Amino acid sequence: MSATQPVLFVSHGAPTFALDPGRPGALLNELGTKLKPRAVVVVSPHWMTRGGIAVTASQRPETIHDFGGFPAALYQLQYPVAGEPFLAAQVAARLNAAGLEAHLDTQRGLDHGAWVPLMHLFPDAEIPAIQVSMPATLTTEGAWKLGEALAPLAAEGVLILASGSLTHNLYEIRFNDTRGDVAAQAFVDWARQAVTTHDRAALVDYLRVAPNAQRAHPSSDHYLPLLVAAGAAGAEAPVTVLDGGMQHGVLSMESYLFGEVSA
């Protein structure tokens, strides 16, 4: 049986992260060489569902290219990872037992919020992966509780990967701008402090207490995975910052590893 796994929050950036990994991709690749999970459970804001939480249960999940207007090479990429239907059933049962309505989806594949970071972590696609949807009505408290419900999987050798973006203001993207926006960086600095000190109250109430919160996240969907990860990790887990910098002026690529990597 695989050793207890840490929990990972990844900022997955723009879809072009798949083709241009840069420093954040290198950080994930280096981390992936140290991680030895038996499977990965991914939460991504690019799969939001009504009528409860869905869990992928196909043997070979499709690589979903859920974006438009990007270079043709991006649509040729495939991540031929195996699914894990038995684990999917266990996850759905665990969520239902926690009072979170969940069901299996045997048709759904992995969206780019899942397969792009997985491609950098495990480029050989050798670790089975399933995806858990985010409810369309998910709140910050709900995201934390979702993480808590998934938490026991880590002790069973499963890597919990919450994929979002530490900042996500698509209205202000400036492609090829490497300088970084002052307002976005202020939010990143606040988030790093809150995450590394396990300040649950601040993280959950970010819209009221964080600097430039509404500007950093015009909608909450890409922020909520951070709370899933923090909820899954618990208050005692050491936090390692993976500083991927800022892309396109306003997209933070900062990621966090909660817990330790087993030798």
Image: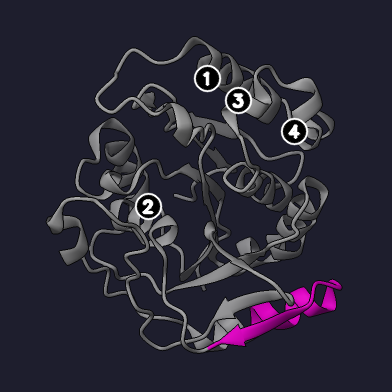
Q: Are marks 1 and 3 in contact (CB under 8 Å)?
A: yes
Label 4: which secondary element: helix
Tell me which corner region of the image, top left, top right, bottom left or bottom right, holds residue 199: top right
The foreground one among 88 and 261 is: 88
Q: Is residue 95 magenta?
A: yes
Could you tell which of marks 1 and 2 lies nearer the N-terminus? 2
Q: CA distance from mark 1 to mark 2?
A: 22 Å
Among all residues in the image, which is located at the extreme left? 73
- Mark 2: which amino acid? Pro
- Residue 188 lies left or right of residue 50; in this view the side is left
Question: Mark on residue 203?
Answer: 4
Q: CA distance from mark 1 to mark 3?
A: 8 Å
Above or below, 106 against 97 in this view is below
Residue placed under numbered mark 2 in the picture: 117
Q: Residue 56 location, x and y as percent?
A: 52, 79
- Mark 4: which amino acid? Leu
Tell me which corner region of the image, top left, top right, bottom left or bottom right, holds residue 75: bottom left
Could you tell which of marks 4 and 1 lies nearer the N-terminus? 1
Could you tell which of marks 1 and 3 lies nearer the N-terminus? 1
Could you tell which of marks 3 and 4 lies nearer the N-terminus? 4
Q: Residue 167 location, x and y as percent?
A: 53, 31
Look at the image and give the residue range highlighted in magenta.
90-105
- Depth check, mark 1 against mark 3: the one in front is 3
Residue placed under numbered mark 3 in the picture: 215
The foreground one among 212 and 256 is: 212
Q: Identify the residue shown where x is 42% and y is 70%.
A: 110
Label 3: which secondary element: helix
Q: Are marks 2 and 3 in contact (CB under 8 Å)?
A: no
Circle 2 packing at 10 Å, graded few (<14), some (14-19), many (20+), is many
